[in-house]
Amino acid sequence: MLALMKSLMNSIFGKFVVMIIIAGMAFWGADQAWTSMNTGLGNDLAAAGPRGIDMTTLDRRVENLLRNINANAEKPITKSEAVDQGIVDQVFQLETSKIVNLGYASTIGIKPSTDAVVEQLKTVDAFKNPLTGELDLNTYREVLYQNRFTKDEYEQQVADDLILKTLGDAATAAIYPPQILASIQALYIGETRDVSWFILDATKAPTPDAPTDEDIRAFYDENLAALEQPERRAIDLLRMSADDFLSNVTVTEQEIATIYEATKSERFSEPDQRTFIELYFADRDTARAAFGQLAGGADPATLSGVLSSETRTGNKESVADTALQDAMFGPGKQSGALFGPRESNGKWLVARLVSVQPGAVYPIETVSDVIRDELMRERAQVHFYENLDALDRSIGAGYPLSQIASELGVPIISFAPVDETGTTKDGVNMTGLVAARDAFSDAFRVNAGEVSSRYDGDDAVYLTSPRTIIAPSTPDFDTVKDDIRQTLVAQRAANAMQAYSDSVIEKVKSGDPTLAGAASAAGANVESPTLPVTRITAEQSGLPTSAISAIFAGRDGDVFSYPNRTGDKFMIVQLNKIMPPSDAALEMLGTQATSSLNQALRDDLQFAAEAEIRNAMKLKVNDNGLAAYKKSVATDQ
């Protein structure tokens, strides 16, 4: 498309066409603006008080969610599918709930301080310098860039999270359920289900009739749409990462030696040993006076009011108290560092670091490869960022993928034809191609030879270009006749095994035979859990999750069946008896019942508070704008 626009601008007629296109775009934009003005929401899809959410922000939230879902999914979900499955609506509802609460917080003046936001940033390991363990601004900026966040956007999100937590904590503070509810809850969670089961071998079911040629032909005629092969595209992929520029990097032995000398005591040595003295005092004032004297250089042996003292030597892991550990072993701590005063078992502790004994340093020969690899990757990352600009210029110029790859010195990976899920005709999923995500999806929106938009992954950027496009087609009957026969055979066998299981269940429900009799007739043994099955112990019972749900919703004598993955064996489960907990069990369950009730009450109170806030804030929603967004997503896909 970019190449076409560029060529059009080289002629008078072409310029006229481009002017018409631009005018049409302007008209569409004006129409959208008019629609937005009519809602009183401006560019926002929803607003409550001073807070709102626009189309760009919603799109980002949807993309972030899909990125997380698709990270471990066998089949990635596209935005279009997210619309169809209601995921976009769920994200929008969640975001409107947030802006209602944030809008309310703004109207009553709740706002976190800059210090509170900074303290929250300090807790994120990804932002810390690996040497000092402290918040590192350069690392912070790089991580935000990699995740396509600006500093202001991310810090606003952190501030919003702190506000929401404050509102939630305020709504659910000091919750204590009445004892009568705790007693009822204890009865509920302590109730025992007596269950037993056996495994039914469903392959013993009567063999169904084999499908005839007429059956196969009828199936083919009735399922032409399902048998149609989808459009497939042979796709070329350009994946550019820092690894592509490792060969351009040189690291000298002198550079390795310099870094080794500068960091060997912190990074390339055994853990150091530290000696520190712990002093205990009877009260806080005495401990504070001693702390002041120690800070002034006093000898611990000269202090008054010391109840006891202990000199300890060890490594960081030998100190269980994390606060004391940080004071004695934290980055930059030197002899004379102090800790306390702090109450400990009725006494007041003050500690002083006496000496630091460095650990043995590893020889440079054993760590040079580690340093070299780090330096090479650091410098390759710089080359990578420098080449991003060149990549964008090539995309903007409308160059074909082969030319872009040649100018960057990055190889192209060619894939066999796949459908929109990344699966070949033989059922092989091309995970390397699917990893390109939006760039992969774009390959099904552009013509052969055109280049997709750039997609930025966690550690690489992607471009795709379809080589060839194979149109959808329905195979001839003779081609798929044998496959259909196998499908029908498997289908009828599965139906027969399910019917066999159903017949056993109906007989057990009638009491003729009993579960034990049915198991004996099937050549199986009856089994029971080793522990009583309660709502607390159910997960350790060996029962499937679906069976656990059923037996706690069932009644005495109910029978259920659960097939295995292949459908050739069924677990036949019977709920024999429901028994209330004993008095001793109820006494033991009291604390747990109170705890679970606390959480339930907190959830209810939070829900009620949010409902009141929503009524007070009068949420405004641009339904037309949301529909337009979903329509644009479906069209793009």
Image (tube, rainbow, N blue to C red):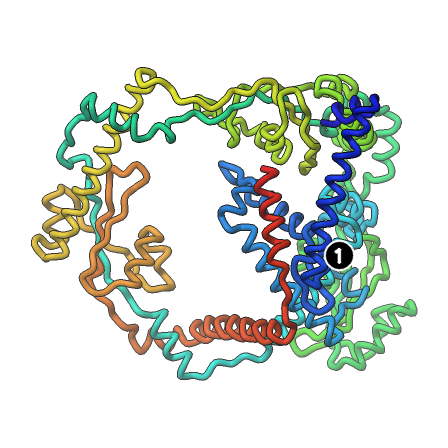
Judge left or right: residue 415 versus residue 308: left
The percent position of residue 437, horizontal first and vertical second, equals: 61, 35
Judge left or right: residue 133 versus residue 480: right
- Which residue is under mark 1? 121
Residue 325 appears in the rendering: no
Residue 40 appears in the rendering: yes
Judge left or right: residue 79 versus residue 460: left
Identified at 59% across, 59% down, the residue is: 94
Nearer to me, 118 or 411: 411
Nearer to me, 492 or 398: 398
Judge left or right: residue 66 versus residue 195: right
Graded by Cα atoms within 10 Å as few (under 14), some (14 to 19) or many (20 or more), the crowding at tag 1 reads some
What amino acid does circle 1 point to? Answer: Leu
From this view, report whether residue 5 is shown above or below residue 268. Answer: above
* Quarter the C terminus occupies: top right
Secondary structure state at the residue bearing disc 1: helix
The percent position of residue 471, horizontal first and vertical second, equals: 50, 22
Identified at 75% across, 21% down, the residue is: 399
Nearer to me, 306 or 78: 78
The percent position of residue 596, horizontal first and vertical second, equals: 46, 71
From this view, report whether residue 241 is shown above or below residue 234. Answer: below
Q: Quadrant of residue 95?
A: bottom right
* Quarter the N terminus occupies: top right
